[in-house]
Image (cartoon, rainbow, N blue to C red):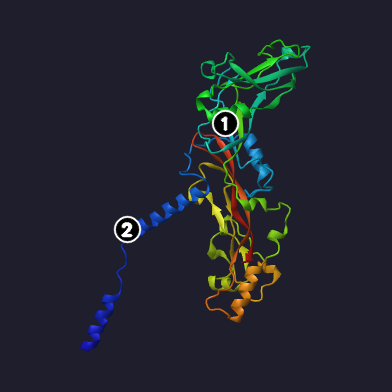
Amino acid sequence: MMLFVISLAALVCTIPARPPLSYLENESKEVHSAAIKRLLEVFGMEDPPAVHGHKQAPQYMLDLYNTVADVDGVTRDPYLLEGNTVRSFFDKLHSEQVEFRFNLSTVARTEKVLTAELHLFKLRPQATLTFNRHHFCQVSVYQLLDTSRNNSTQDRKLLSSRLIPVHSTGWEVFTITQAVRSWMVDEGSNLGLHVVVRTLGGSMMDLKLIRFASGSNHHQSKQPMLVLFTDDGRRSATLESIDPNDTTATSSLPHAPMLGPSTRIARSLDYSEEEGASLPCQRQPLYVDFEEIGWSGWIVSPRGYNAYHCKGSCPFPLGQNMRPTNHATVQSIINALKLIKGIEKPCCVPDKLFSINLLYFDDDENVVLKQYNDMVAGSCGCH
């Protein structure tokens, strides 16, 4: 009896003490913080942008997003967008005159400016212009210069000029890439832009007749806007190998049932972890919900996306439906014949990756459209 008591006491002493709840909570917070930080790095950010309330994204940026991305944010065609970033900026002068200035401080110096466009909304002509003999006018956009810095007597430089119908209304776009590139080199040279409207004969037109929306008297949706198409150099080599018309990438392997946001967690699958491991290699859902992460305040679209993940076995012999590489086929044979110890079966991994697009507000309330490579498993194979 005494021996039994001693043994029981020794057993109790060997049971590890349960960590305090506060320790587990702190450890969980550290893991969460590290995970969010790493996810931000994937999206090229150090910190999440500040949330500025319920602001409306420019219609142009919404339309552009819907053109390059599907409903889940996945890129429709990797070659449709010039560069991988599109930034929009509203005029900071809010002047009733035809002078505009844009704050480009959020653009990284490492970004390559590919194209810069000035978007101006031409207002409907006033009634007094109905019987005007002019049917076209020449609109010219100038870069304002600092004569004390450029050792020149010129106070402006012509960037773009073209004819537009006098009686038209709507958006007019002017290319001003040269000016923006100079501003990126020397931020202090950004004195803004000046727009001049002339008749075909060269005389100045009355700006009360030909007007562009600007200032507090016009809705935000019609304010002057600068749009930059840039590339941050993060495009990977995998993008070049993607054929947007390739339908075999997602059709040759079996897929697990498609799961929506309401059934995105792993335990919602129809089989257990053990059963899943015995199934052949296949693509399964992995939904990333930006609201659950806490990013819904600054991301406009999408609200989340399906990254998918690959799961399943790669049994011998590997069929072509498993999309094996030659290396995986050889490894599978060596494993099956047990020719060398320690050689495992090939693994089920993504063999096709697609990019997604994110439309979001930056710290200065500018709307940015950015494309991120290798974010969605397009198909799975045994490698």
Q: Quadrant of residue 331?
A: bottom right
Q: Nearer the viewer, residue 35 or 292?
A: 35
Q: Residues within 10 Å of mark 1 (few under 14, many from 20)?
A: many
- Going by the image, does 293 lie left or right of 63? left
Q: Give the x, y percent position of residue 368.
A: 57, 38
Quadrant the C terminus occupies: bottom right
Q: Nearer the viewer, residue 280 or 335?
A: 335
What is the secondary structure assignment of the residue under circle 2?
A: helix
Label 1: which residue? 89
Label for residue 313? none
What is the secondary structure assignment of the residue under circle 1?
A: strand
Q: Residues within 10 Å of mark 2 (few under 14, many from 20)?
A: few
Q: Give the x, y percent position of residue 296.
A: 52, 45
Q: Nearer the viewer, mark 2 or mark 1?
A: 1
| Whether residue 294 can be seen here | yes
Label 2: which residue? 22
Q: Amino acid at mark 2?
A: Ser
Q: Amino acid at mark 1?
A: Phe
Q: Give the x, y percent position of residue 244.
A: 71, 51
Which residue is located at x 59 percent, y 77 percent?
335
Residue found at the far left of this picture: 2
Q: CA distance from mark 2 to mark 1?
A: 46 Å
